[in-house]
Image (spheres, helix red, strand yellow):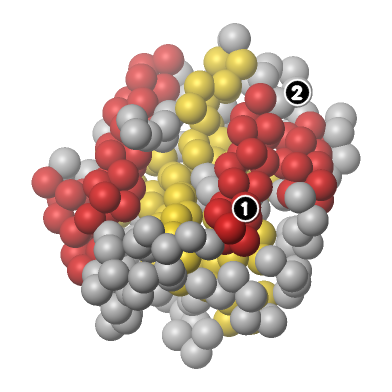
């Protein structure tokens, strides 16, 4: 299913995106060595409920997971890259943490992810990988405009990741959003320009470049959800929800700091 939102629905999506951005920024600001992943999940739950929003994750039970997910945010640490199930794990200085959050507010969903290194210890390799996903995300957003094709976005994202030297996995990528979290069209993190669905104003897309340092192969934890690099290498993940407008793309989940 591909939804094209009305101007009123896009306006509601702005409020959802702002909430997601604020929660992610607040969680990042609160995270330090000694933070437990279940604390992060609890903080996310409280902020979602206080805003009168609904979690997209708690009851989520897709074919690729061992559902329902049962938590409010994905917390992926070091070699975990996607769908990290919160557990009784305490973060250490230097851990690479990815937070992925999707909520529904006013009947419209927004989805975003950030990666950062816990604490202040210098980690050039992790910083470079995170920066590559952020550049790829910016490139995909820059390519998004009415009349462009999904392949144009995928090509822009993939070019940045490949030029940075990272293998690209296409099992999971970006997707449409709207009244539900995961919709068509699928947006792989590499592709051929000029191919795929043509973008139209009112379309909401979640673009999410993610990489693993030295492999394109994923393995699944015993929890049935957490996806890790097959080699144990570090990973990074960046994501924004955008709205296609007559002028291009509007980032709905842009953080204020």
Give the quadrant of the C terminus: top left
- For image coordinates 50% across by 90% down, the residue present is 222
Q: Tag 1: Cα neighbours inside 10 Å, few (<14), some, or many (≥20)?
A: few
Q: Which mark is residue 148?
A: 2
- For image coordinates 75% across by 23% down, the residue present is 148
Does 145 appear above or below 66? Answer: above
Q: Which residue corresponds to mark 1? A: 128
- For image coordinates 33% across by 74% down, the residue present is 91
Task: Provide residue 118's location: percent of width, then percent of height.
Answer: 38, 63
Task: Provide residue 129's location: percent of width, then percent of height.
Answer: 62, 55
Does 147 appear above or below 110? Answer: above
Task: Provide residue 75's location: percent of width, then percent of height.
Answer: 39, 66
Which picture quadrant has residue 43?
A: bottom left
Does 183 appear above or below 200? Answer: below
Between 120 and 218, the residue placed more toward the observer is 120
Q: Which mark is residue 175?
A: none
Between 256 and 33, the residue placed more toward the observer is 33
Sequence order check, earlier mark of 2 and 1? 1
Q: Residue furthest left?
A: 50
Q: Is residue 65 left or right of residue 57?
A: right
Task: Provide residue 17's location: percent of width, then percent of height.
Answer: 36, 34
């Amino acid at each position: 299913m591909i939804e094209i939102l009305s101007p009123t629905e896009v306006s509601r999506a702005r409020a959802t995106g702002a909430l997601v951005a604020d929660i992610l920024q607040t969680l990042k600001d609160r995270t330090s060595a000694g933070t437990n992943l279940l604390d992060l999940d609890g903080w996310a739950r409280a902020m979602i409920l206080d805003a009168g929003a609904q979690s997209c994750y708690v009851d989520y039970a897709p074919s690729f997971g061992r559902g329902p997910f049962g938590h409010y945010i994905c917390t992926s640490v070091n070699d975990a890259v996607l769908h990290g199930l919160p557990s009784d794990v305490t973060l250490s200085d230097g851990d690479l943490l990815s937070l992925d959050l999707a909520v529904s507010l006013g009947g419209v969903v927004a989805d975003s992810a950030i990666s950062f290194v816990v604490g202040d210890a210098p980690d050039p390799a992790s910083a470079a990988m995170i920066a590559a996903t952020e550049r790829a995300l910016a490139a995909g957003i820059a390519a998004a405009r009415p009349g462009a094709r999904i392949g144009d976005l995928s090509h822009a994202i993939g070019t940045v990741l490949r030029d940075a030297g990272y293998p690209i996995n296409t099992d999971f990528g970006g997707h449409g959003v709207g009244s539900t979290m995961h919709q068509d069209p699928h947006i792989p993190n590499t592709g051929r320009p000029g191919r795929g669905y043509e973008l139209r104003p009112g379309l909401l897309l979640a673009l999410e470049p993610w990489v693993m340092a030295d492999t394109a192969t994923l393995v699944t934890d015993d929890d049935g959800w957490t996806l890790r690099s097959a080699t144990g290498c570090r990973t990074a993940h960046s994501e924004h929800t955008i709205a296609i407008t007559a002028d291009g793309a509007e980032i709905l989940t842009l953080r204020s700091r």
